[in-house]
């Protein structure tokens, strides 16, 4: 945590800022260790304060050892910030422009009339994971892998998509997940054509492809896995499209390495799908970074032509093909970027599984 504070203060110095107000939950946790749901950080070049309410003062004291814990009063949290700004002669204070609402910004302006508020985005400071973060992500991946192994014996004709999602979520929590990484996706049969198809009461039938996209949270860190399985023997078209997606996914994984931008990696997998005649049916990016939030930067997508991958970033590789009125197939791994190539964390088989 001390190194993270040093990194944050270097960020302030490079932008000639006197301090920063941090309210985004992921950044608040990253820079302080505080996991509560209410409060802000006020960090300057010499001070680190965590302002919160009565519900969280004891928790904050236990989690944020490098911070002075401040219980803010009825006058409001930004009035408390204004008092400290006056005491420490702060003139330029940053805030998280990608998180603070217009109402929140208006409250800042009103409470800090003599302060120049500077918009910044901090997520880039979380993009390279340290050893502790990587260990937590690996544990989250292992939990999701184990849940996938379990669900293979649960899926059968007559089971609803909702039941599959519930069983996945129960299994992950029973294995130590503190939460699910995002709303679990289970889409079977023709519903697989929806990349983010939420589970419904639809019953799974023999001959269905079932796409499951899910993840676990372990000590705040997320995993993300997608697998598509066949209930019964796959037909020729299902097998053909599965092999195209698998080839694209494997090529995408091989392309991941430090020094490349997301667009370059996305293009490798996208070309395979396009050359096979299904380019128009792969409409999303190849992947995204993961960490304290499920969708972080950088993205592996056609739109990322500038941000290069660096060692120890963690990203997903998840190509898919989605055919209206037929269904869809997606395969996804979570990987760690290395200087040469990447380390694939997801261990679940990617070969077509016929249940």
Image: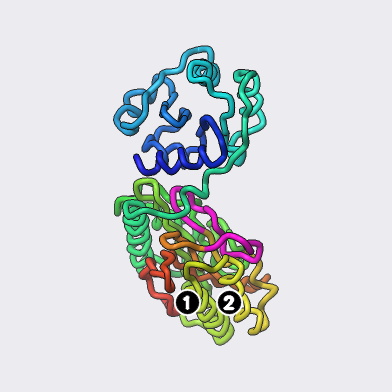
Residue 93 position in % (x across, y down): 56, 29
Q: Do the CB atoms of the residues marked 2 and 1 lie less than 8 Å apart?
A: yes
Which residues are drawn in magenta?
289-308
Viewer-proximal residue among 241 and 167: 241
In x, y percent, where is residue 85? Answer: 52, 20
For the C terminus, the quadrant is: bottom left
For image coordinates 47% across by 55% down, the residue present is 290
**Which quadrant of the structure image shows residue 147?**
bottom left
Residue drawn at 64 percent across, 84 percent down: 276
Specify the quadrant that holds the N terminus: top left
The residue nearer to you, when weighing 217 against 205, is 217
Q: Observer-nearest residue: 210 or 35?
A: 35
Mark 1 highlights which residue? 254
How far from the left and from the top, in percent, is residue 158? 47, 66
- In the image, which disc is placed on residue 268? 2
Mark 2, Cα crowd under 10 Å, few <14 / some 14-19 / many 20+, is some
Could you say where residue 129 lies in the image, as x and y percent from the top left? Answer: 40, 54
Rendered position, 2 above or below 299 = above
**Does the magenta segment cover residue 298?**
yes
Q: How much space separates mark 2 and mark 1, taking CA atoms?
A: 9 Å
Q: Assign a secondary structure to mark 2.
A: helix
Question: Which quadrant of the figure has residue 260?
Answer: bottom right
Q: In the picture, residue 216 is in which quadrant?
A: bottom left
Q: Residues within 10 Å of mark 1 (few under 14, many from 20)?
A: some
Residue 29 visible to the viewer: yes
Whether residue 71 is in magenta: the answer is: no
Closer to the chain start, of discs 2 and 1, is 1
The residue shown at (34%, 59%) is 138
């Amino acid at each position: 945590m001390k190194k993270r504070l040093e990194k944050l203060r270097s960020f302030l110095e490079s932008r000639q800022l006197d301090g920063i107000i941090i309210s985004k939950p992921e950044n608040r946790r990253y820079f302080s260790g505080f996991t509560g749901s209410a409060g802000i950080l006020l960090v300057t070049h010499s001070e680190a304060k965590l302002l919160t309410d009565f519900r969280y003062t004891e928790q904050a004291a236990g989690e944020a050892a490098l911070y002075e814990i401040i219980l803010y009063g009825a006058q409001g949290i930004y009035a408390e910030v204004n008092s400290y700004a006056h005491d420490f002669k702060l003139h330029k204070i940053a805030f998280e422009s990608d998180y603070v609402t217009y109402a929140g910004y208006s409250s800042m302006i009103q409470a800090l009339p003599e302060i120049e508020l500077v918009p910044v985005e901090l997520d880039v400071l979380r993009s390279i994971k340290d050893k502790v973060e990587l260990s937590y992500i690996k544990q989250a991946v292992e939990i999701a892998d184990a849940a996938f192994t379990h669900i293979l014996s649960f899926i059968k004709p007559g089971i609803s998509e909702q039941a599959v999602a519930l069983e996945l979520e129960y299994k992950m929590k029973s294995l130590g997940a503190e939460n699910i990484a995002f709303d679990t996706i289970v889409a079977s049969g023709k519903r697989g054509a929806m990349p983010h198809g939420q589970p419904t009461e639809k019953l799974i039938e023999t001959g269905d492809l079932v796409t499951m996209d899910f993840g676990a949270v372990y000590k705040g860190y997320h995993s993300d896995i997608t697998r598509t399985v066949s209930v019964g023997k796959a037909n020729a078209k299902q097998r053909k499209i599965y092999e195209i997606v698998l080839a694209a996914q494997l090529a995408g994984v091989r392309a991941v390495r430090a020094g490349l931008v997301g667009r370059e990696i996305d293009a490798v997998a996208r070309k395979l799908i396009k050359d096979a005649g299904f380019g128009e049916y792969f409409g999303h990016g190849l992947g995204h970074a993961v960490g304290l939030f499920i969708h972080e930067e950088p993205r592996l997508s056609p739109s990322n032509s500038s941000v290069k991958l660096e060692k120890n970033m963690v990203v997903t590789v998840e190509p898919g093909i989605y055919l209206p009125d037929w269904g869809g197939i997606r395969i996804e791994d979570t990987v760690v970027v290395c200087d040469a190539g990447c380390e694939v964390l997801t261990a679940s088989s990617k070969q077509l599984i016929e249940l």
